[in-house]
Amino acid sequence: MNFINRISFVAVLALSLVLGACSKKSKDDGDVAAADESMMVTDLSAGSTIPEMPPIYFAYDSFNLDSVAKSTLMGHAAWLRNNAGVNVQVEGHTDERGTTEYNLALGERRSGSIRDFLISQGINSGRLSTISYGEERPSVSGASNEATWSRNRRSEFVMAN
């Protein structure tokens, strides 16, 4: 997939996530959705990315959660409450700028800020673990520019044991 196609895909994915986060369901629809989500979880194994929990993106050199991140994480917390048997590892990632040591520390602060937010929303801390990969696992590679860097400054959610 060339760079333009990747950017287009990411833009469409981001738009669908924003629109999905803005939609409201009736109580009955939520119960059906929760049951469907629980069934999907059984297909995942430890280390698998959780599709119902899209990544959280960060500003340059920051681990602060903006309003979009907090809104998205409220949905993640609701999903976790409906899937009480799921343990999650929050992975912190950075762009390529900075030293390896600095990026590992920043990735850890990013995953930690998400863990702390989820705990503040009532998720048991025992269900959440964190890890930092710094710049080692980019989501997008190739060009060294803001479009690429902004997609790599993220935290992702994977199934944990």
Image: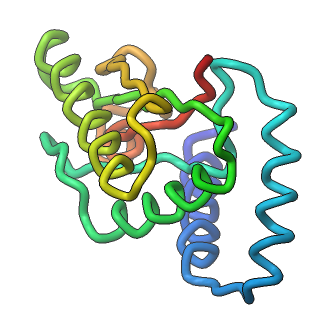
Residue 9's spot in the image, x, y percent?
Answer: 64, 54
Residue at image coords 87%, 57%: 36
Q: Is 93 displayed left or right of 8 in the figure?
A: left
| Quarter of the C terminus within the rendering | top right
Measured along the vertical axis of the image, is residue 100 above or below residue 92?
above
Q: Quadrant of the N terminus?
A: top right
Q: Is residue 120 above or below residue 23?
A: above
Residue located at (50% from left, 56% from top): 77
- Residue at horizontal 68 percent and vertical 18 percent from the top: 46
x and y, in percent, of residue 31 in the image = 80, 71
The answer to which quarter of the image holds residue 153 is: top left
Instruction: Using the image, determine if residue 126 lies above or below residue 146.
Output: above
- In the rendered image, residue 110, in percent from the top left (x then y), is placed at 26, 37
Q: Is residue 154 visible?
A: yes
Q: Is residue 83 left or right of residue 120?
A: right
Give whichever of 17, 28 is nearer the camera. Answer: 28
Q: Nearer the viewer, residue 161 or 109?
A: 161
Across and down, in percent, residue 60 comes to 17, 45
Residue 142 seen by the camera: no
28 left or right of 122 in image = right
